[in-house]
Amino acid sequence: MKILLDAMGGDNAPDANIKGAVNAINQINAEVVLIGNENIINSKIKELFGKSNISEISDRLSIKHATETIEMEDIPTHAIKTKKDSSMVVGFNMLKNGEGDVFISAGNSGALLTGATLLVGRIKGIDRPALAGILPSYKSRLLLIDSGSNTNCKPINLLQFAQMATIYLSSTYGTERPKIGLLNIGTEENKGNELTKESYKLLKEKSEELNINFIGNIEGRDAFSGNVDAIVTDGFTGNVFLKAVEGVGRFVKVSLSESLKKNFLSTMAAIPAMPGIKRFAKTVDYKEYGGALFLGVKKPVVKAHGSSDEKLFEFTIKQAENFVKNKTVDNMIEEFKKINSKSGDKIINAE
């Protein structure tokens, strides 16, 4: 297996990208290809690790030279079409041509989504691919889809998000009949805006036919109860929800740490509880869960956080290996083939 990593994408590139790849390489079986300016990457390898060649660190690490970089301020479609030798476009073309098994980037989100759709292509039967992020939940995990790629959605999009979530959780984590909820401001069927009310109706109508275990509306406060496996929503709401959760997680960790260090007595009292405190901190740390998977395209694509540090790149690389091992994309393609043949495209083209 070969993991393709955009070495120039993200706020902390290329240092964090390189360090994350080096940290991950002895925890995985795959090869990792760092895509970007070879001179810059090699100089960083020497600066960070004192090696003149990346292969001295591991024979499963290599570099693919790319002369350009898509910047965060670049217009997505224009950048994908004009920066042909950017680390992102080179990565997508390698993925498309079978020169890699999964592509990871922390770069320009819009460009990543545009490139995945235009260069790699959508799975037949999926109108809009979506970002699916994993979050901690009580004694479990929570899949959030869409977490930021489609800010304007139709009910059919949320129905397809539910389909993709079901297939992903079943094939990757072995979750039997994953419970799918619709993010809303109340649990009642008639609550919400036009999108959520119409989406509820469509999910309720099509769930049995599409093997979706739809459990109804879920309020934000109940999302982490452990009673739901995946939450579907539009990308605008999902991204706001995601960033609020990440912010609360950071707040809890900082506040807890400061409270324990407030005085001598609280510090001494915390010592016996430190193993439990560390387990709790790990549970609420979003970095432990890697990046967001871009579900709905023909090859595996992972969007790492733009602010990813070496730890988050490390976990994202490990997550990407599992994504490929579990053949999630292949399973999704097969499932949608079955759905398309049964529905005659009626569901796909619903308004």
Image (cartoon, rainbow, N blue to C red):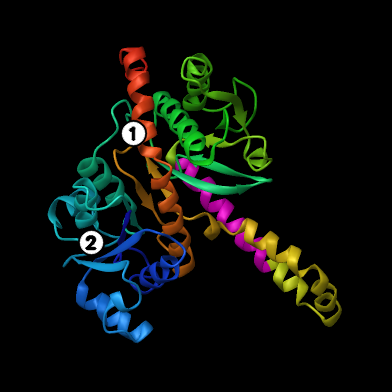
- Of 327 and 243, the residue lying toward us: 327
The answer to whether residue 319 is left or right of residue 94 is right
Viewer-side label of 1, 2: 2
**Up-down relation of residue 351 to residue 192 (above or below):** above
Q: Earlier in the sequence, mark 1 or mark 2?
A: 2
Image quarter where the C terminus lies is: top left
**Up-down relation of residue 181 to residue 307 (above or below):** above
| Residue 93 visible in the current orientation | yes
| Circle 1: element type | loop
Q: Which residue is mark 2?
A: 87
At 45% from the left and 28% from the top, the residue drawn is 163
| Mark 1 closeness class: few <14, some 14–19, many ≥20 residues within 10 Å | many
At 46% from the left and 19% from the top, the residue drawn is 210
Q: Which region of the structure is painted magenta? A: 236-254
The answer to whether residue 188 is left or right of residue 126 is right
* Residue 282 horizontal/vertical position (percent): 63, 61
| Circle 2: element type | helix
At 38% from the left and 32% from the top, the residue drawn is 332
Identity of the amino acid at label 1?
A: Arg
Q: Say which mark, if any, is on residue 128.
A: 1
At 74% from the left and 67% from the top, the residue drawn is 275
Is residue 252 highlighted in magenta?
Answer: yes
* Residue 327 horizontal/vertical position (percent): 39, 40
**Up-down relation of residue 142 to residue 65 (above or below):** above
The answer to whether residue 90 is left or right of residue 267 is left
Identity of the amino acid at label 2?
A: Ser
